[in-house]
Amino acid sequence: MQSQLLTGENKQFSRADTLRGSLRPERTSFDVLSYNLDIQLDPKERFLSGFNEIEFRVLEKTSKIQLDLFQNMKIDSIVFNETNLTYERDEHAVFINFETPLKAGTTESLTFYYSGYPVVAKNAPWDGGFVFSEDKQGKPFIAVAVQGTGASLWYPNKDHQSDEPDSADIKVSVPNGLMNVSNGRLIEEIPLDNAYTKWHWRVEHPINNYNITLNIADYAHFEDEYRGLSLNYYVLKENLEKAKEQFQQVKPMMDCFYEKFGEYPFQKDGYKLVETPYLGMEHQSAVAYGNNYLNGYLGKDMSNTGIGLKWDFIIIHESAHEWFGNSVSAADIADMWIHESFTAYAESVYVECEYGKKDAVQYLYGLRRIISNDKPIIGKYGLNHEGSGDMYYKGANMLNTLRSVINNDEKWWKLLKEFHETFKYQTIHADDVIDFYNQNTNFDLKPIFNQYLNYADIPELQLKFNDKGQVHMRWKTDVKNFKMPIEFQNSTEKIIKRQVVGNDWESIDLEINDIDELAINRYGFYIDITKIDESN
């Protein structure tokens, strides 16, 4: 397939993007059931070797399937029923041939042996790859982060978010004296003859490919418990006392998220915070933590309100992904807003639980200063393409706007929890989210979602005031037939009025002498406001 040009952007999609992002028969013909990843990492040489045993169910008769592994990694062999399979490599895709077509309805497995020097990240977690660092004693301190770049950077898999393995075994062998921490629960620690130790972890819930991880260091371990959920913490030994104090934020966070989103979704796998040599990542049941044991975002408040300095950004944000991103997952990275918008909004949910609604809304309002409104939040489907980085805080302010539209906090919290409970352990699309909220409210939310997600501009409320003292309002939007309520009051009155406004001018019932006397609820609604003075 030829490269495609993204309309409206200077973005040219490569063949690698198409192979990674699209769902062709070589991918849709099978469903991954489990991964059994067994590798050894030499920290000194930065060399990785091993295999991934992939169990899958055949959905349609096929003689060829696509798996993925970065080109710089060597394929040693691919074995199926004790026979080496032939394959072709195309960019990062590996097309595997079966001499006898696989029959629909059967369960099969193959073992993919590989080795090589995986990509080293230049600035993790913003680019994908391994981070090779050291602790204060000079011992290896190693981790990996591959969101967006692709899990196939370091292990072979079906690298598309629509297909999550139902379970995974992760076995990582490292030199004696070091520990590997991966997702799930520790099954066993196996001494090997070559002065290495194999650490075997097991995941018993569906998991995104990019969430599967390894963390290698001379870790100190301490643990706690929350409502029967095991809380395990792995940190560098020199940071043990700081971690014991900072990680006390986990329990009040759990109190909040249990109430607002529902029970922690990975009970069988437990919850872990694992110190890493990069800032953080939402690795399922093994959340990466590198915020230097500081409140805020590396000690800074992105909202510029002071509220963000009351809590540790990485603990709260990355842990919230356990509900949104890890449990409820986007089937295509074009819909990564499902992960990031809800998780960014969860920051304000935590603030509201701890400090009240006023601070939560103030925090969200403060974050608007870093919104670009540069391009749509939703990316291009089937092309391994994410939308705007505004998916974080424009998305969070969109959700706060929806809360104001619904105008019933009891119903809002009920919907938020039901949304997670309805779609947990599933991969979904934007339409699933929009249909859920639309069907469970008495207001047509589709045009509102459409404007915030598919267009760069936010709704513009236009106000017109004439010499008769009459005020009119309308929404200027890219979406046709757009309707959304707005709240306002005369600056001299305390009574808040509410009116549904569309794209046509509508008069409002309010007596004012000057348009500047009109106060609009800017905190509850993320909008632009334009005043047109017709008094002259």
Image: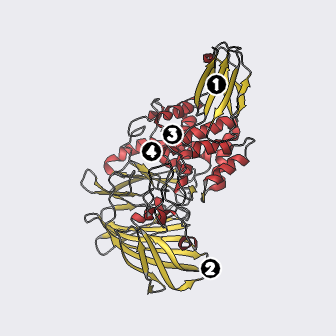
Please name which of the two marks, 2 or 3, marks the residue nearer to the observer. Answer: 3
Q: Amino acid at mark 2?
A: Ala
Q: Which mark is first along the chain, 3 or 1?
A: 3
Q: Which residue is mark 4?
A: 314
Seen at 73% across and 43% down, the residue is 441
Q: Which mark is first along the chain, 4 or 2?
A: 2
Q: CA distance from mark 4 to mark 3?
A: 25 Å
Residue 327 seen anywhere in this rendered image of the structure: no
For the residues bearing labels 1 and 2, Cβ distance under 8 angstroms: no
Mark 3 is surrounded, within 10 Å at the Cα level, by few (under 14), some (14 to 19) or many (20 or more) other residues, namely some
Task: Give the SS element for disc 1.
Answer: strand
For the residues bearing labels 2 and 4, Cβ distance under 8 angstroms: no
Left or right: 432 as drawn, with respect to 210: right
Q: CA distance from mark 1 to mark 3?
A: 22 Å
Q: Which residue is mark 2?
A: 104
Vertical position of residue 507 compared to residue 369: above or below: above
Seen at 49% across and 73% down, the residue is 66
Vertical position of residue 269 compared to residue 101: above or below: above
Q: Amino acid at mark 1?
A: Leu
